[in-house]
Image (cartoon, rainbow, N blue to C red):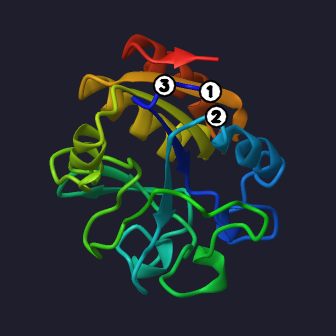
Amino acid sequence: MHPKSHALIVIDVQNDFCPGGALAVAGGDDIVAGINTLMDDFGVVVLTQDWHPVGHSSFASSHAGKSPLELVDMPYGPQVLWPDHCIQGTTGADFHADLRTDADLIIRKGMNPAIDSYSAFFENDHTTPTGLEGYLRTRGITDVTLVGLATDFCVNYSAVDAANLGFKVTVRTDLCRGIDFDGSLAAAIEGMKSAGVTVL
């Protein structure tokens, strides 16, 4: 068992990120059983859920003539365009059916139609908070372990933000899976390590 000051954060284990989903990560469902087992080692468990409105600005379908995985410039910086995914209230946005959802907190992100939100802590402008930091601080959390989907996007951004906020951060790559296009996975792992994240 980890001390009560150590929380497990499970990132976006949702149908659309698992095989058969709109933005499937290869092997995304292979990590579910391991995550369920790991939950018993932590006094605090947080699940995050991508929760986009229809027509979200990060969807390629919201930009005429654009395809998924193209880059566009948004007011907050470059944004990868994605297939429509994790739309509020759809089966794709649901947690994987086998994932335990007996968590202390479920935090939804990506709800603002004008801005994407990879990180569990901040929207992609890196300044608008989700409220997760305040929750963890009031629960006395100093250490966080991250697992989930996808290693090179939402897990990566969440881990770096947590480290920058002063939490002691571990990422269990055996319980994460990545998208990895154009070397994004290796870059994310290097970036996390440079931010002081322990990558196991």
Q: Is residue 109 above or below residue 193?
A: below
- Which class describes the residues within 10 Å of circle 2: few (<14), some (14-19), or many (20+)? some
Q: Is residue 14 visible?
A: yes
- Which class describes the residues within 10 Å of circle 1: few (<14), some (14-19), or many (20+)? few
* Residue marked by disc 3: 3
Q: Is residue 14 above or below residue 118?
A: below
Which secondary structure, mark 3?
A: loop
Residue at horizontal 71 percent and vertical 37 percent from the top: 175
Q: What is the spatial separation of the Cα atoms under label 1 and label 2, in whole angstroms?
A: 4 Å
* Residue marked by disc 1: 1
Residue at horizontal 41 percent and vertical 39 percent from the top: 158
Residues at marks 1 and 3 touching, judged by CB atoms closer than 8 Å: yes
Mark 1 or mark 2, which has the lower sequence index? Answer: 1
Which secondary structure, mark 2?
A: loop
Instruction: Decide if residue 140 is on the left or right side of residue 200.
Output: left
* Residue marked by disc 2: 41
The quarter of the rendered structure image containing the N terminus is: top right
Residue at horizontal 81 percent and vertical 70 percent from the top: 20
Q: Is residue 183 above or below residue 130?
A: above
Residue at horizontal 34 percent and vertical 33 percent from the top: 141
Front one among 79 and 168 = 168
Residues at marks 1 and 2 touching, judged by CB atoms closer than 8 Å: yes
Front one among 35 and 103 = 103
Q: What is the spatial separation of the Cα atoms under label 1 and label 3, in whole angstroms?
A: 7 Å
Q: Position of residue 104 (x, y in %)?
A: 46, 56
Front one among 74 and 91 = 91
Amino acid at pointer 2:
Asp
Q: Is residue 178 visible?
A: no
Q: Is residue 173 above or below residue 151?
A: above
